[in-house]
Amino acid sequence: MAGALLDGAVIPETGSLVQLIRGQLIVHGLVAWSGEGRFGLKFSGRIDVQQWRAATSNIEQERVDKVVRLVKAGVVPLPVQSLSKSGREMAASRPELARDLRRVAGLLDELGEELAGDADTLARHGLALQSIDISVQLLAAIEALIGQDQEPGDVALKLEALRRSADQALRRSI
């Protein structure tokens, strides 16, 4: 197969380059047309439809596929009970939010380090890995500001430089 008709909540513009990933399968393509919640994708090469439709061995992909099926079927998530006042205060405390940011930065940093350790991945996705690194630094700076670990003026200068780097990385990916 050389192309596909896709639908979704976010539709890329005609002429955009996209990447579809399902488990270990990856295909690149060009958006040939788009409109009314759908778009046509021309693949960069031919794909084996049976391979893409086959059951995946990736547990996370299976979970994503199940969620997509449920959303398309109109299933509404169960409402979450509101937190008690003390729960809201605890969840929104500055030290706890700072620790959450540190956790996220740590997870992203581990991911970046693991991916950068593979020469082929580094060669193919160097700019994306750089974006992960910028994200980790930005999260760390926000964590320092929220956790009040550093002087606000020092963090503000670092944040401004990181924001510019992030904006450049985002423009690069468009």
Image (cartoon, grey):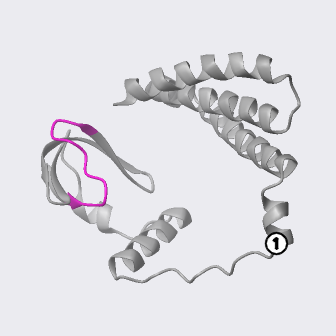
Few, some or many C-alpha atoms within 10 Å of disc 1 (few <14, some 14-19, many ≥20)? few
Q: Quadrant of residue 159?
A: top right
Residue 4 appearing in the image: yes
Q: Decide: is 122 above or below 26.
A: above
Coordinates of residue 115 in the picture (x, y in percent): 60, 35
The image shows residue 92, relative to residue 42, as above or below, that is below
Q: Residue at x 61, y 32 (%)?
A: 135
Badge 1 marks a residue whose secondary structure is: helix
Q: Where is residue 130 in the image (x, y as percent from the top left)?
A: 56, 24
Above or below residue 30? Residue 167 is above
User: Which residue is painted at 50% across and 24% down in the image?
Assistant: 126
> Left or right: where does residue 141 sit relative to residue 118?
right
| Residue 100: in magenta span | no
- Is residue 119 among the parts visible in the rendering? no
Task: Indicate the quadrant containing the N terminus: top left, top right, bottom left or bottom right.
Answer: bottom left
Residue sitting nearer the eye, 91 or 135: 91
Which kind of residue does numbered mark 1 sit on? Answer: Lys
Quarter of the figure with residue 6 = bottom left
* Residue 124 on image: x %, y %: 44, 27
Q: What's the residue at 22%, 51% (across, down)? A: 47
Image coordinates for residue 3, horizontal then vertical, percent: 15, 51
**Range shown magenta:** 6-17
Query: Which quadrant is the C terminus positioned in?
Result: top left
Q: In this view, does 16 lie to the left or right of 87?
A: left
Q: Main secondary structure of the magenta part?
A: loop
Q: Tell whether position 13 is magenta.
A: yes
Q: Nearer the viewer, residue 89 or 50?
A: 89
